[in-house]
Amino acid sequence: MHDIPRLKGIPQQWRRTMNENEHLKNLYRATQLKVEAPEAILERTLRAFDDEASVANARKSLDERTCQSRPLRAVSRKRVPFYAAAACLAVAALGFGAAHVANSNADNANASAPNGIVAATNLDFTVKAYASGTQTPLAIGDNGMIVFSRASDTALATAEYDTNGSYTGCLFRVEAEGVKTVQAHISKGMLYRYDVQNATYTTDAELLAEAASWKPMKRGIGDALGMYDMVSTGIMDDGLAKDDPNKTYQVQTSKRLGQTAELDYSEGDSQAYFGLWTNDPLDLDDKSEKDDSSDPEFDAIANAFEGAELTITVTFDDGRTSTQVIELHAGDFAAKWNAEDPDGLATLEIEPTLLDNASKVPDDEFVVRTVYGEVVSSSDEAFPFADEPVNEYENVIDDPTLFSQDYGEDFWSEGYGVEIVENGRSFMTYANVNTGKPDEDPFTAREDSPSLAITDVGIETVKGLPEGTQIAHTEIARMAPLAYWNRIVLQLCGFSLNDDLTPSDGASVVKASFLVSNTSSETKVLRISSAFGIGKIEGNSLFYEAFDAAHPLMYEVTKEDGTVLGWLGNDMLTLAPGESAQMNAYWEISDAAFTGKNPAIGFGANGERNVAVPFTLS
């Protein structure tokens, strides 16, 4: 046994360094999820769709992620998957879809209770807490104490918390016979609604694909889930294999309601949960003597509800009303990670017994701070907050997460020393360090000596992308749909694309076309999306690549055998000795940023340019 330990070593997320890589980091965040998904979701999605844009979108959303179990005695700010298909965004990432949490004790509400606390046996209805992510019912603590779970990902110290607060994962539901409506009011913070929908790829492929690609930056976009403030996905333990089309997944949604909220059980709301929400300024310096945590934000979330009153009124089918007032507090509880299950997923188990400074916990346990509640009054009075706005934010969507700083200024890379080649001339450039194995890491450095000949170069300003272009065959697929692409690129670059794929006011589209040929005796591989860039030339040999002054739109590559490639999931070009391919590349650029500059296209694998070809904007 030992004194109460605290959780340490949780890495800070979304810390940003203002340097020339910031644009690329933020762009990467925009393409990534805040949830993680296994390969099974990817494969089921690809087999379920005929629409190529949705396939490409789903693939980007779901690949390159693996579910990771939690290390013992540490709670990471990244989610603990509970059979999780759950993200990343990246999450920036936010307060739900968390660990499988369970209380170890059975219901043990006492018939008697200390002064000021109402005995559970005297209540007309039960307020039961549930684990976020798994919806596991949690055991009642001593004297009917309601011990809430909490999500492991609270999105603190980020613009997301400042703007949209924390969906804490402190879930509860009212249980009784003959319930018609449930009304609730909280004196601190707000209440949100948490719902779970089961789905399979046999019947709900589009819904699951949209859920898997959700992220805070995408909030408000999507046919099925655009109205929710938070979305996560999970995999049910139904005994079926992960690649079975009838495997059951969960789509978990959260919607902020307001300080006063109502659920209508007679209209099908009985399976919905309430959750505690806060965006109160967090006192990160208010730590107890035993708290030596390097990341006090988790505790601060619980502390934000200290002393709050949660008032709940149930109206029964026969017209009766019953009202409970629950006083909320923040407290410390012992917890531990149980052994991993066959899928490698750990379970967090919380003991629902309040600890004090003198408490001891076993060596295999640690302490978590969460919210707990005690019923301090019960009556048959009507809801005392009936005159307050109800479900005030039910039809108001949280703002999407934005980048942490403003863009729109000219922003260029450091200068590359390159050879300046006039438009129309031939030259040599580099392939990737790869010998005909597309499954190898595409981000390896360029080869030592250039082996690719570039000929027939033509660069011009065009009206937009060709008519009939499929979104799935463009760079837009990396951040689809177009509305999400525009949301991101408008922040980064100050321009967007119209619905007909023409540039917005103040922007232009540049097209470069050329022939690339492998002049070596070995097979060469080129990662198309990083092989070329648009920028400016200064002096006699310096090429500055544009970051937030331009953005790639599409790469179209046609090989000698007629194969066409260049888009998401299909952007590795393999050339046999002597083989050639025709390339067309499109960028949208800021007119203001390029006015008076000497624009050019740079060539060279993986962003390492060795040649730049200047052109004139028309």
Image: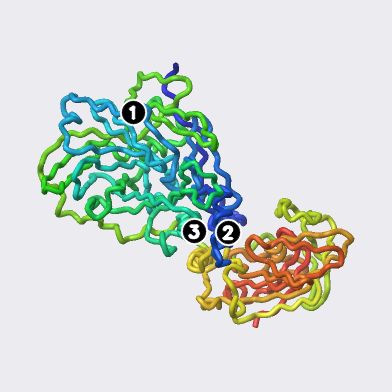
| 496 with respect to 174 (left or right) | right
Q: Which residue is mark 3?
A: 205
Residue type of the residue flagged with mark 3: Ala
Q: Rate crowding at label 2 as few (under 14), some (14 to 19) or many (20 or more) other CA atoms within 10 Å.
A: some
What residue lies at 52% left-to-right and 52% top-to-bottom? 245
Q: Position of residue 42 (x, y in %)?
A: 57, 54
What residue lies at 18% left-to-right and 24% top-to-bottom? 112
Which comes before the other along the chain, label 3 or label 2? 2
- Seen from the viewer's position, the closer of residues 174 and 460 is 174
Q: Position of residue 600 (x, y in %)?
A: 71, 72
Residue type of the residue flagged with mark 1: Pro
Disc ID at residue 352? 1
Which comes before the other along the chain, label 1 or label 2? 2
Q: Which residue is mark 2?
A: 46
Which comes before the other along the chain, label 3 or label 1? 3
Residue 549 higher or lower than 167, as above or below: below
